[in-house]
């Protein structure tokens, strides 16, 4: 069910990111949520027959009289993200948006007293903001290390907020990385370290791997750090992560990554999954899990979050072929689209990816 909310403020956080502050239209309290959860925003866009659904993290600590969603403009001039472009360009204070109740399993357990390490890149900072603000408000706070990477100050969101929290609370340590800082940027003020976040840096600045780690960002970023943390001694129970956005930068051309079906896999269980826009094709068999699992195994990370068919963020147009769901999703995709986190191909299929 979707509920109307009013946009009460719109704040530019960087060249590519705006935050939208939302309140109830009827003055009733907004639904409670846990730090790290998201809402679905339903948008009626010009030229679109069906409403467009997008998943956005609630980027402030729970318990406020408002929600805050922090939205990065996706795509580029020739292929813009239609939802984020609409929000950035055509939504202003006083406008109404329709949102779902908060949902999602990538959350900070508030009862735990273990040290917390928050590691993010780009707009993956949004769930970390909610988690960091939550820890800052705790009467018996945990130690927390906050690592975030951006390209430069132009696209770095909310560094003043996280630095202010670190100044106010001695148990919070903040490290901002810029991979391509401008010459005028000042180390220690605009950023702390030049380059990307890597395992060696974490190991130099963390006293131990015995902490709860939360990672959010592009798939390649999350995967490399997660595997490294496991080698350092982190257990699966200590590692929580979420992919954020599309990361095609590590994709390899089709001819280099096509799988050769195993000799013992019946042909009846082999399907080809073709991505039309990126001109790639992969072999799926019944041991590969969902279509999303297959793509992630090939270093392709479409937008996704819940992996249960509830958040709709992985909804993708099916251009040809048929699929089945296992498990059945909780939400119903729009006509012509499928939820790839739960879908398995029944025939060769083509996707609008």
Image (spheres, helix red, strand yellow):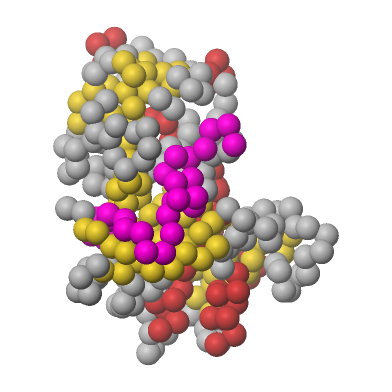
Residue farthest along the front direction in this orientation:
94
The quarter of the rendered structure image containing the C terminus is top left
* Magenta segment boundaries in residue numbering: 77-105
Taking 153 as reference, is 287 above or below it? above
Of 181 and 69, which appears nearest the observer?
A: 69
Residue drawn at point x = 17 percent, y = 53 percent: 1
Q: Is residue 64 visible?
A: yes
Taking the spot 48% from the left edge, 80% from the top edge, the residue there is 143
Horizontal and vertical percent position of residue 331: 19, 42
Tally of numbered discs: 0
The image position of residue 78, as x and y in percent, is: 58, 32
94 in magenta: yes
Given residues 340 and 234, the one toward you in this image is: 340
Is residue 24 found inside the magenta-colored segment of the image? no
Say left or right for 205 vs 328.
right
Q: Position of residue 341 (x, y in %)?
A: 30, 37
Residue nearest the viewer, comparing 283 with 87 = 87
Q: Quadrant of residue 202?
A: bottom right
Residue beneath the point at 68% across and 61% down? 153
Image position of 121 with respect to 295: above or below: below
- Please identify the residue farthest to the bottom as the structure is shown: 139
């Amino acid at each position: 069910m979707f509920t109307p909310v009013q946009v009460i403020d719109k704040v530019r956080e960087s060249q590519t990111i705006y935050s939208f502050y939302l309140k109830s239209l009827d003055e009733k309290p907004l639904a409670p949520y846990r730090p790290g959860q998201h809402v679905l925003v339903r948008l009626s866009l010009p030229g679109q027959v069906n409403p467009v659904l997008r998943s956005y993290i609630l980027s402030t600590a729970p318990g406020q009289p408002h929600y805050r969603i922090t939205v990065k403009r996706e795509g580029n001039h020739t292929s813009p993200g239609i939802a984020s472009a609409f929000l950035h360009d055509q939504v202003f204070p006083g406008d109404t948006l329709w949102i779902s109740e908060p949902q999602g399993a990538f959350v900070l357990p508030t009862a735990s007293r273990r040290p917390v390490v928050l590691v993010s890149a780009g707009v993956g900072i949004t769930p970390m903001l909610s988690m960091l603000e939550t820890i800052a408000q705790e009467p018996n706070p945990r130690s927390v290390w906050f690592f975030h990477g951006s390209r430069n100050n132009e696209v770095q969101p909310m560094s003043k907020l996280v630095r202010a929290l670190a100044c106010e609370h001695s148990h919070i340590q903040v490290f901002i990385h810029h991979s391509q800082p401008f010459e005028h940027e000042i180390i220690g003020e605009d950023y702390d370290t030049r380059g990307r976040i890597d395992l060696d840096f974490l190991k130099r600045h963390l006293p131990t791997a015995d902490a709860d780690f939360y990672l959010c960002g592009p798939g390649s970023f999350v995967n490399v750090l997660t595997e490294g943390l496991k080698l350092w001694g982190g257990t699966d129970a200590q590692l929580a992560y979420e992919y954020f956005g599309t990361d095609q930068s590590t994709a390899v051309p089709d001819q280099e990554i096509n799988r050769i079906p195993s000799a013992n896999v019946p042909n009846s269980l082999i399907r080809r999954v073709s991505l039309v826009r990126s001109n790639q094709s992969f072999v799926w068999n019944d041991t590969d899990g969902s279509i999303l699992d297959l793509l992630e195994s090939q270093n392709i990370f479409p937008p996704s979050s819940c992996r249960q068919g509830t958040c709709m963020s992985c909804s993708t147009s099916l251009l040809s072929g048929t699929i089945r769901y296992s498990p059945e999703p909780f939400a119903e995709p729009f006509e012509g689209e499928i939820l790839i986190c739960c879908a398995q191909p029944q025939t060769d299929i083509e996707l609008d990816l």
